[in-house]
Amino acid sequence: MTAPRTRNRLRARLAAPAAVLAAGLALAGCSGTASPSTSTPSESAGAGYPVTTSSCGRDHTYDKAPTRVVIGNENSLKTIDALGVSDAVYGYVLGPDDAGKTPAGLPKNLVEVSSTTIPAREPVIAAKPDLFLSYNEAQLTTQGSLSYDDLNGIGANAYVMGAYCAKNPDNRSIDTVYTDVTNLGRIFGAPQKALQLNEKLKDRVAAAKKSLDGSSATVAFLKVAGGKVYAIGGYPVSAILGALGLKNQFADLPTPFAELSTEQALSMKPDVVFVNYVGDEQAAIDELAQALPDLQAMKAGHVYGANESGPQGGGVGIIESLEAIAADVKTATK
């Protein structure tokens, strides 16, 4: 049996974009053909306001840097803080794994705007944000919840981190992270800081890949829920493994998150397995061992827990997860 690690280094958000959402969205995913969020050609590195960026196919124009931001997931603070603009954040929406409780470590001055991951319109409107920084477009498109029209009505913009849009390619690359950083730098009037941050993030990715000494190990990401095993192949798994030069066991999965068939279970022979979990890492590993006792990676002790919360807010959190994944793969394959 694979023993749990003594500290939770890996915080990979491995489920599909909407898989973390509450009330019936626990195992749903987003897919489609739209392009990731990009900046318009008019936004050169030193350009001033107004600045226009595109998010989930919608253009948003900023006449000045936002000063009252509500973030759809507290983990986006990692990127905001790395850009040096965290003073602009007013409040946050609790994440799907917070179970209605304020997560430890948040700045005390921040206001809890909504205790539900899919926020109602009233508390967000009452907060009077000039930007809602979402981590999943479902926060803006679920019936009866906050909407783009609600934000437009109070003069607020929206930006969706990670291009977690209702329609978007499943197997996006690590460039999605750099695009978010670039766009946020322009939105907050800090393009040079964004450029510097991206250089640092790219260096970290390069160092993580180098640490693997050219390994091309096959890696499978799985989740056990209700006694069933689910395969995960979409973003950010696709981005992380692609950047590290590793093989994604489920790169050809038709959806980013799907129940593992008996045929798939019998045919796959990954070198390393990561199992998604919330709360108890060893319990998740034990559940996987019970469901797939003959998995070679399990017998070899090459199964690691993947805490779901870390990269939910995109950006820097994705890179942190990539580094942790690289470290575990290196340990398993040395």
Image (tube, rainbow, N blue to C red):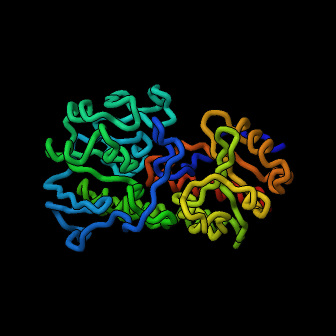
- Pick the quarter of the image with the N terminus: top right
**Above/below status of 19 relative to 171:** above
Residue in front for this viewpoint, 37 or 249: 249
98 left or right, relative to 135:
right
Residue in front for this viewpoint, 250 or 113: 250
Residue 285 visible in the displayed image: yes
Q: Quadrant of residue 207?
A: bottom right
- Pick the quarter of the image with the C terminus: bottom right
Residue 330 visible in the displayed image: no
Give coordinates of residue 146: x percent, y percent: 28, 40
263 left or right, relative to 255:
right
| Residue drawn at x 21%, y 57% as measured from the top left | 60
Residue placed furthest toward the front: 262
**Above/below status of 309 relative to 32:** above
Q: Quadrant of residue 147?
A: top left
| Residue drawn at x 66%, y 51% as measured from the top left | 222
Residue in front for this viewpoint, 31 or 45: 31
